[in-house]
Amino acid sequence: MTPGELQETLSRLSGNRVLLVVTDNRRRMVSVRRGGPGFREVRLQRIFLSAPDEVVRALAAMAAGRGGDRAAIRAFIAEALPAGRKEAEKRSPTDPPTTSTPGMFHDIHAYARELNSLYLDSRSTADIAWGRSGGGRIRRSIQFGSYDPVRNLITMNRRLDRSDIPRYFIEYILFHEMLHEVLGIGERPDGRRDIHGRIFKLMESTFPDFDKAARFERELVKRLDLL
């Protein structure tokens, strides 16, 4: 399929005007950016030009804001680009996992299972992993956790695996990312993405140590040189 044909198909199936950008980027295989009402910019790695119909339909659903069958997309990526994915994972400390071990001080898998059972009705299915250890100079900002919807992966910044980082803060970051998975990304009336909408904030506030964790995060950000 040519880029033009894929763009036309995505526009027809999603009900939006799609601008397709085909890239050679193996770090970010799929992204959808909302412009004005009814407009989407879809950036795809060129392997998707040979995607089967079910994957194209899943991409169209993402462009329509319906989520889509991300399992089908992940399976297609794994089959079409098995070796390239390892290179694609050489990113920031919070992005790719290098191990699924619990951690030196915090068992994030046990934390996630408990959070999922207590607060999310076991709806979270994402894999949980520590990211790579950071190196070099300390940045002026830091990402404590991230959720990758294509790989259905929550990655925690390995710098948080310390004895002086309280469990409730690790759980707070985990819960935040699990909510991204469970709730997905909404859309505002103007067509812009609504990442932390009203429902998200309401559910996040149900975390028992929400206020304490938010205060700890503010203090931690002020002393990033300690991480």
Image (tube, rainbow, N blue to C red):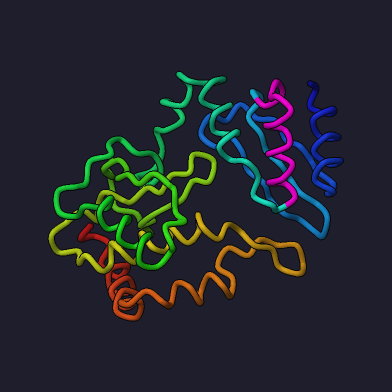
Residue 204: x and y in percent read 44, 72
Q: Which residues are magenta?
A: 48-64
Classify residue 188 by image quadrant. Answer: bottom right
108 in the magenta segment: no
Instruction: Report the side of 184 relative to 227 (left or right).
Output: right
Q: At x 63% / y 65%, what residue is drawn?
A: 194
Foreground pick, 114 / 42: 114
Q: At x 41% / y 77%, what residue is drawn?
A: 206
56 in the magenta segment: yes
User: Which quadrant, please, contains the N terminus?
Assistant: top right
Instruction: Report the side of 84 relative to 207 (left or right).
Output: right
Q: At x 43% / y 26%, what residue is drawn?
A: 87
Q: At x 82% / y 41%, what residue is drawn?
A: 13
Residue 142: x and y in percent read 36, 57
Foreground pick, 30 / 219: 30
Residue 58: x and y in percent read 68, 39
Q: Main secondary structure of the magenta part?
A: helix
Foreground pick, 201 / 119: 119
Residue 29: x and y in percent read 58, 34
